[in-house]
Structure formats: C-alpha cells, structure tokens
Amino acid sequence: MPEFIAPYILLSEYVCSHCGQLPPGLKRTSDGDWPQVFEALFTRFAALREAVGHPIDVSGYRCSVRDREVSGLTLSVHGFGLALDLGIAADEQPSFMHLIDMVCPYLRVGTNTHPGATHVHIDTGFYISPIYSSSL
C-alpha cells in the first residue's frame, strides 16, 4: 500500500529523486503534526486537489545536488521542502491558475511549459525565516 506524507501526496513523490531524503526540517511535532510551515503547503495542496477532483502528479523536495541539476540554483524553495511542482498540461494551466486564485489565493505560483517540464509551481516560501544556530 502506498505511503502518504500528506493528503494526496505520496512519500515517493515528495522525497528527493536524487538522494531519497526528506527536507531536514520535516519532523513531526510532539502532537504528531508536521511543523506549521509544511502544513501550510500540504493543506493548500489538499484543497486544490479536492477542487480539481482527480489525481495530480507531484514533485516536491530537492536536495542541493538535485536543485542544481533541475534549476541551476544552489538554493531554492524546493530545497526547503516548501514547494511542489504539479503536473498540469499547458492547455489546462490557465483554468488551473484561476482555480488557485479562487481556492488558495495566498500561494506563490509560477508556470513552466518548456519541453519535458510542463508544470505549475506552488510554494509557501514566504514562511521561511532564519533559525539560530550556534554553529554559525
């Protein structure tokens, strides 16, 4: 039976395709929930998925190696685990973008339609904040 990390998101879709890991900050709280910063993404995606009414292909977390391969960036919102790329065909993107505006207006959104990578990017990167570390 497939393992889900959140409603409608398979663990296998969310882990990094390069290293098979989850984002370092994704650890359940003492009450068994994900930290709020991840819940924000997961619950918004669930609302979108329910509004669409059918499965959506998802790609989530990327380690720094995979991020450089895919985007050329050393650090992106995917590297924090706070972004999802959703497999939405180019001809469906305008109506899907309208759906996002109606269901989840507070998501950051972008589209990508270059050959082999047609998707809609959603993220909650605006929740990222510095965390103190004595090692810095």
Image (cartoon, grey):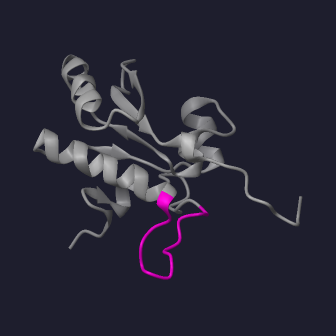
Residue 118 locus on image (x, y percent):
33, 25
Q: State whether the magenta stretch is mostly helix, strand or loop.
A: loop
Give the residue at x 59% y 36%.
69
**Residue 33 on the magenta segment:** yes
Give the residue at x 59% y 63%.
25
**Residue 124 on the magenta segment:** no
Residue 102 locus on image (x, y percent):
23, 30
In the rendered image, the residue lying farthest to the bottom is 30
Give the residue at x 82% y 63%.
133
Residue 61 locus on image (x, y percent):
50, 51
Residue 73 locus on image (x, y percent):
65, 33
Please state the extent of the stretch shown in magenta in the rendering.
24-36
Foreground pick, 16 / 38: 38
Above or below for 117 versus 90: below
Give the residue at x 23% y 42%.
48
Figure label count: 0
Could one spot residue 20 in this view of the protein?
Answer: yes
Could one spot residue 55 in this view of the protein?
Answer: no
Foreground pick, 6 / 35: 35
20 relative position to 113: left or right? right
14 relative position to 10: left or right? right
Figure quadrant of residue 14: bottom left
Q: Look at the image and tell me in which quarter the C terminus lies.
A: bottom right
Q: Look at the image and tell me in which quarter the N terminus lies.
A: bottom left
In the rendered image, the residue lying farthest to the left is 53
Figure quadrant of residue 59: top left
68 relative position to 8: left or right? right
